[in-house]
Image (cartoon, rainbow, N blue to C red):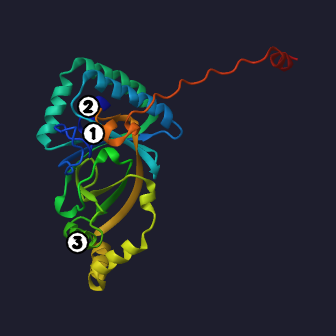
């Protein structure tokens, strides 16, 4: 399937199609759509310039559904393009509307051909929010700059054990560190069954620095007995657990203009400088090489 079609299912977690752009803080979207590209090593800059063409096409069309892009700060060479919806019905409506826009589809078709040069693979992923296993206060996504994304794969038939282990941790964090947040999504398409994605938004990488006092408070809130139970539940249920850190890409994101007011000039990036032409060789140097 062309990227222009995958894009319709693809961009997720942050901005709802019905978002009131003047109020950025809000609950996480119920349906998260992610388009993930694997980028050739050393071609990140060239890929970014092509992706900016998609943003310009959406701006020209004044498309009402926004998206955020992010690239790895640590962990891989991929790029994620994310859009959020309140329901699958909204996602389908957005796809149908985009398919009817001949100019936008033509622009996407042109960009697809250029973008293919820099990709080694791509994947479309759809997730649904798990409210019971998420925690933390609402936050203004326009002020965030990073996501920590943890991918958990659970053994077939062991979801309940993992959910119980997650609830033990979530309950403890709510008591010990009420300002912390973590949003859980269940993958429904695009990845193996039993895959869950945890998103933690961050304003800066400094938030990753260890905080022994908070760690002790969480451990105390869990308690020794629950900690042992949780470790066994995780050992019985989890096959793998991997965390990557992604930085938001303002140049590849398509966000409301109001984000410049709430999130700063980060969301109004300057265009990249044009490549410098190769310096002409001096006549004396050229003469030496021919001798």
Residue 14 higher or lower than 176, as above or below: above
User: Residue 245, image x and y in percent?
Assistant: 42, 53
Q: Quadrant of the C terminus?
A: top right
**Which is nearer the eye, 277 or 146?**
146
Mark toward the viewer: 3 or 1: 3
Residue 36 in sight from this viewpoint: no
Is the residue marked by circle 3 packed among few (<14), some (14-19), or many (20+) residues within 10 Å? Answer: some
Q: Residue at x 62, y 20 (%)?
A: 277
Q: As displayed, is residue 170 above or below residue 221?
A: above
**Quadrant in which the N terminus appears:** top left
Query: Is 89 positioned to the left or the right of 189 in the image?
Result: left
Determine whether label 2 and label 1 are within 8 Å by CB. no
Direction from residue 164 to residue 40 in the image, left or right: right
Q: State which quadrant residue 55 falls in.
A: top left
> Can residue 159 be spotted in the picture?
yes
- Judge from the rendering whether residue 25 lies leftward or rightward of residue 212; answer left or right: left
Q: Which mark is residue 5?
A: 2
Q: What residue did someone put label 1 on? A: 10
Q: What is the distance, in whole Å, between disc 2 and disc 1 at their CAs?
A: 9 Å
Residue 171: mark: 3
Q: Position of residue 274 (x, y in %)?
A: 53, 23
Helix, strand or loop status at disc 1: loop
Dot 2: what SS? helix
- How many C-alpha atoms fall within 10 Å of the one at disc 2: few (<14), some, or many (≥20)? some
């Amino acid at each position: 399937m062309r990227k222009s079609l995958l894009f319709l299912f693809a961009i997720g977690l942050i901005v709802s199609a019905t978002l009131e752009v003047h109020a950025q803080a809000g609950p996480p979207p119920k349906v998260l759509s992610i388009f993930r590209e694997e980028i050739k090593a050393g071609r990140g800059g060239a890929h970014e310039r092509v992706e900016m063409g998609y943003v310009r096409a959406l701006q020209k069309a004044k498309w009402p559904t926004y998206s955020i892009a992010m690239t790895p700060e640590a962990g891989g060479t991929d790029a994620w393009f994310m859009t959020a919806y309140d329901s699958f019905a909204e996602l389908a409506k957005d796809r149908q509307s985009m398919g009817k826009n001949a100019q936008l589809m033509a622009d996407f078709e042109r960009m697809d051909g250029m973008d293919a040069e820099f990709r080694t693979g791509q994947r479309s992923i759809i997730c649904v929010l798990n409210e019971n296993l998420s925690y933390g206060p609402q936050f203004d996504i326009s002020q965030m700059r990073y996501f920590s994304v943890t991918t958990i794969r659970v053994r077939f038939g062991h979801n309940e054990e993992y959910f119980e282990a997650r609830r033990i941790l979530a309950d403890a964090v709510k008591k010990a560190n009420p300002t912390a947040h973590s949003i859980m999504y269940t993958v429904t398409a695009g990845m193996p069954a039993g895959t869950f994605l945890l998103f933690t938004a961050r304003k800066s990488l400094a938030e990753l620095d260890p905080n022994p006092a908070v760690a002790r408070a969480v451990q105390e809130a869990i308690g020794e007995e629950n900690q042992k139970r949780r470790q066994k539940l995780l050992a019985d249920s989890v096959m793998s657990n991997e965390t990557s850190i992604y930085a938001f890409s303002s140049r590849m994101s398509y966000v409301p203009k109001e984000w410049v007011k709430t999130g700063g000039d980060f969301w109004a990036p300057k265009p990249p400088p044009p490549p410098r032409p190769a310096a002409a060789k001096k006549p004396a140097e050229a003469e030496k090489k021919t001798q």
